[in-house]
Image (tube, helix red, strand yellow):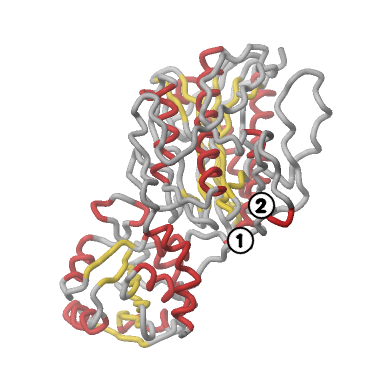
């Protein structure tokens, strides 16, 4: 048996799950009233939350999501290696204390339900290793992936940095601006096609080098490169269904097809190569998580002190404080979204120097932050937190947040349940489950965005998004990659709430890496 065939056999089970979800696994209409997903057992209700004590307002009775019995809410809290020591046990009923660990990267184990006896130790599955990212330099592994995808090759393409996926994988030296191609064939050696003036940028690549001088040369050499191939993958998505995987322009796709070769999407290949975190990325992600948590605490303390002292501060003031802190801590960051009052009703609001509102007593405040270490192995971490510049939370706002947080937990429990059963799940299915829950709660008209998105070395990562709203992402959630889960509810002109966590998809199940907020944080003492 050849080495390529051995790799193909080893990768076949996981790749098969990604390319061909099991028969009967497609969900029924998630909007049908009281219609459960087929092929799923009747789940047990999630445990009810205890009344809110932090804000002095009793929590409204919230709809109960159909969370699997073995994935109850308390077992899915993050393993924060930087968390403070747990508080002393409360004298009245409260949430279970979140587990704390000193190791930065342990997998999150999901305990069995109480009524199910634990398996004998000898029968427990061994903990699976964290999947490593497949490098395109490992031609045997790439060819194994191509074999199970039934592809003749993967044609990576870029022009002037327009395709960050290809740039990340090929890593050309310098900043080439002219069109280039790099073919990873299912059989044989790789072939690069580059402009004659930029050959030096691609000397490090394995395989044969072809050059061109003008567009006539380019068409001729491209035809020679693809001779004998029938189907290749490229960063293309039919009808733009998955925008993050649609990086090659329509004209270039036409040029490839003109050679007689069919083009399919590389979205699954990208999940195994660019979207996977690897051990170094997972560790770097946890460091970014720690910094975000500390910066969030500092920002809210800054707001609380200013409001309590009658000092005027704006959303932009808080945003700039966060940005300075991120720079000091060695983070690359997106501009933090800091919204107060009615601005929270816009899920895409970001303050600027020219457009910012003051933060006043009684305002709902939403902080949405995302950052990564400024290092090659850096993986983005994202979190959204909701607070109120007051001592109590109005019941309608508390109820909206509870509903959003339960939709978040419903999504997480569904992913955990499928992982436990070794069954694939698509990003679209998770989004469907969250929005079906919102519909049953009677607030579907307040949803304005997808449930979550992939995260890797880009904030909008190359893996599957939790989306059947803005686009239909039918890719399988792949172990070794990461996502955000961040459902929100918005009342136009009034307020909005969102609860976002970052999640690593470990082989044993989802691992929540950021703190999961269960109640709106009050900033002023009663």
Q: Are marks 2 and 1 in contact (CB under 8 Å)?
A: yes
Across and down, in percent, residue 96 comes to 72, 30
Q: x%, y% of residue 350?
A: 46, 35
Q: At x 22% / y 69%, what residue is drawn?
A: 262
What percent of the width, then of the height, locates residue 518? 61, 28
Residue 441 horizontal side relative to residue 180, left or right: right
Secondary structure at badge 2 equals loop
- The number of numbered discs placed on residues in the rendered structure image is 2
Q: Residue furthest right?
A: 88
| Front residue (pair 9, 133) | 9
- On the rendered structure, is 311 left or right of 16? right
Residue assigned mark 1 = 130
Crowd around label 2: few <14 · some 14–19 · many ≥20 (10 Å)? many
Residue at the farthest bottom position: 208
Q: Residue at x 54, y 43 (%)?
A: 417
- The span from disc 2 to disc 1 (Cα, nearest Å) is 9 Å
**Position in image of residue 351 (x %, y %):** 47, 33
Q: Which residue is mark 2?
A: 107
Q: Is residue 81 above or below residue 159?
A: above
Q: Quadrant of residue 215?
A: bottom left
Query: In the displayed structure, would residue 329 be above or below residue 218?
Result: above
Q: Which residue is painted at 48% across and 59% down in the image?
A: 275
Residue drawn at (78%, 50%) of the image: 102
What secondary structure is marked by label 1? loop
Q: Quadrant of residue 448?
A: top left
Q: Earlier in the sequence, mark 2 or mark 1?
A: 2
């Amino acid at each position: 048996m050849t080495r390529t065939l051995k790799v193909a056999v080893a990768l076949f089970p996981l790749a098969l799950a990604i390319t061909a979800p099991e028969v009967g696994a497609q969900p029924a209409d998630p909007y049908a009233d009281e219609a459960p997903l087929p092929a799923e057992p009747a789940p047990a209700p999630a445990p009810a939350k205890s009344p809110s004590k932090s804000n002095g307002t009793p929590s409204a009775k919230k709809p109960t999501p159909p969370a699997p019995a073995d994935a109850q809410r308390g077992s899915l809290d993050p393993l924060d290696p930087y968390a403070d020591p747990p508080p002393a046990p409360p004298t009245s009923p409260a949430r279970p204390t979140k587990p704390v660990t000193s190791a930065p990267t342990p997998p999150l184990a999901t305990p069995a339900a109480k009524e199910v006896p634990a398996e004998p130790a000898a029968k427990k599955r061994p903990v699976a290793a964290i999947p490593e990212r497949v490098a395109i330099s490992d031609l045997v592994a790439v060819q194994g992936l191509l074999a199970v995808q039934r592809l003749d090759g993967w044609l990576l393409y870029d022009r002037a940095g327009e395709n960050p996926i290809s740039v990340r994988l090929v890593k050309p030296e310098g900043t080439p601006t002219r069109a280039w191609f790099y073919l990873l064939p299912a059989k044989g050696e790789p072939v690069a096609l580059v402009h004659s003036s930029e050959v030096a940028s691609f000397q490090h690549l394995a395989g044969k080098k072809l050059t061109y001088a003008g567009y006539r040369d380019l068409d001729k050499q491209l035809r020679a490169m693809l001779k004998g191939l029938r189907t290749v993958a490229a960063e293309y998505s039919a009808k733009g269904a998955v925008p993050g995987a649609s990086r090659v322009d329509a004209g270039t796709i036409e040029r490839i097809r003109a050679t007689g070769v069919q083009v399919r999407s590389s979205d699954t290949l990208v999940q195994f190569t660019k979207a996977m975190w690897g051990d170094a990325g997972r560790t770097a992600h946890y460091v970014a998580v720690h910094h975000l948590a500390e910066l969030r605490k500092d920002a809210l303390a800054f707001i609380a002190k200013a409001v309590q002292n009658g000092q005027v501060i704006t959303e932009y003031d808080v945003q700039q404080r966060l940005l300075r802190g991120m720079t000091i801590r060695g983070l690359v960051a997106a501009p933090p979204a800091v919204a107060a009052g009615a601005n929270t009703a816009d899920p895409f609001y970001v303050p600027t120097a020219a457009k910012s509102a003051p933060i006043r007593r009684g305002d709902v405040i939403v902080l949405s932050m995302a950052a990564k270490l400024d290092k090659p192995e850096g993986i983005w971490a994202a979190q959204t937190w909701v607070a109120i510049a007051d001592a109590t939370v109005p019941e309608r706002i508390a109820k909206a947040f509870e509903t959003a947080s339960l939709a978040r937990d419903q999504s997480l429990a569904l992913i955990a349940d499928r992982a436990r059963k070794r069954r694939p799940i698509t990003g679209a299915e998770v989004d469907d489950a969250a929005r079906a829950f919102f519909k049953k709660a009677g607030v579907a008209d307040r949803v304005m965005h997808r449930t979550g998105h992939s995260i890797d070395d880009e904030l909008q990562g190359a893996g599957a998004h939790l989306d059947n709203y803005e686009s239909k992402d039918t890719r399988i959630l792949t172990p070794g990659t990461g996502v955000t889960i961040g459902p929100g509810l918005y009342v136009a002109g009034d307020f909005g709430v969102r609860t976002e966590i970052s999640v690593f998809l470990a082989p044993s199940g989802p691992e929540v890496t950021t703190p999961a907020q269960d109640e709106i944080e009050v900033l002023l003492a009663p």
